[in-house]
Amino acid sequence: MTFTSPADVRERLAAVDYLADDAIATTVYLAAALGKPLLVEGPAGVGKTELAKAVAAITDARLVRLQCYEGLDEPRALYEWNYKKQLLRIQAAGDQSWSATHDDIFTEEFLLERPLLAAIRRTDPTVLLIDETDKADVEVEGLLLEVLSDFQVTIPELGTITAARRPFVLLTSNATRELSEALKRRCLYLHLDYPSPERERDIVRARVPGIDEALAGRLAQVVAALRELELKKAPSIAETIDWAHTLLALGLDRLDGDAIAATLGVVLKHRSDQDRALKEVVHGDAAAR
C-alpha cells in the first residue's frame, strides 16, 4: 500500500467523498510509508471509522474490522478452535490413539480465524480497523502490543504465523479512557475533532448530491450551534448528512425554526437534548432575527 505524497492521499480520499485536511492526509501518508499503525482519537462521530473505510476503498484493500467492547478476549479477537467439530472428530476416532487424534483435531480444518489473525494471514492488500479500542479491557492492549510489534501470531499447535504482507492498521478511540503509553508509542497519532462549518458544508455537498449550497451552509451552521450546547450526545457528521437527506426528501429548501423543530429527531436522540436545542437554538435564533 503506497502513496506518492500527502497530496496524493488527499486527492484520492476526495475521490471517495472523504474530505481530508492536511493533518489527515499527511498522517495517513506517513503511516503507509513507515508501516506504522495509526491511532485516531476524538469524539464519536467525527469520521474515524469512515477514514479506515475510505483508505480501504482507495487502495482496493479488504477492510477487516475488530470491534472492541468490554469483555472482548483473545479467542474473539485472535483465533479459537471449533470445539464442537473437534468433539465430533474425537467421537468418530473410535479406538484411535489420543496422540493421533490430537494431531488430527488441531489443524487448519478446525481453526476459526478472528479479525487479528485473519488480517495477518491475508496476502492481498488489507486495512485492519481496530475500532473503539478504548472500550476494550486493558488486558486486550497487551495482545495488541504483541501483534502490532512483530505482526506475527504464535499458535502452539501450528507454530508462528508471520504476516507475509503487513496490513495498514488503524485504531480508533473515543478517549473514554487513556490508552497505555506502550500502545501509543507503537502508533502514529491523529486527533480528529468536529469539522468547521465550512468544511462540514463541503462534506454535506459531497455526500448529498443535489443539495443547495446555501442550505448546506445553513445546515452546517445549525449543527455547529448544537454542538456548542451541553448535550448528552452531540450530532455526528453522519447525522448531519442524514439531516441533509431528510430535508431533500421533504422538499425543504430552507432550514428555518419550523423545519428544525419538525426534523430535529434526525440528529438529536434524547428528549432533553431536543428541548435544550429548541430553547437555545431555534427560539434563540428566532429572537435574534
Image (cartoon, grey):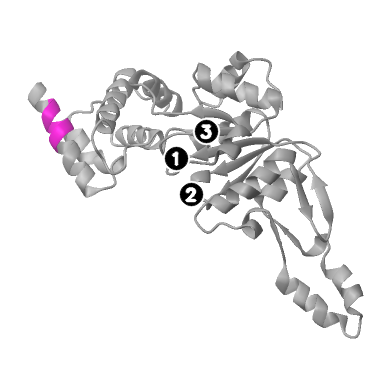
Q: Residue 219 or 194: which is nearer the viewer?
A: 194
What secondary structure do most residues of the magenta stretch adopt?
Answer: helix
Question: Of marks 3 and 1, which one's residue comes earlier in the chain?
Answer: 3
Q: Can residue 85 be seen in this view?
A: yes
- Residue at 52% x, 19% y is 23
Per the model, the C-alpha gap separating discs 2 and 3 is 14 Å
Per the model, the C-alpha gap separating discs 3 and 1 is 9 Å
Q: Quadrant of residue 157?
A: bottom right
Question: Of marks 2 and 3, which one's residue comes earlier in the chain?
Answer: 3
Q: What SS does tag 2 mark?
A: helix
Q: Name the side, left or right, on which 287 lies relative to 98.
A: left
Find disc 2 in the rendering and name its residue.
Answer: 135
Find disc 3 in the rendering and name its residue.
Answer: 40
Per the model, the C-alpha gap separating discs 1 and 2 is 8 Å
Find disc 1 in the rendering and name its residue.
Answer: 174
Q: Which amino acid does label 1 sit on?
A: Asn
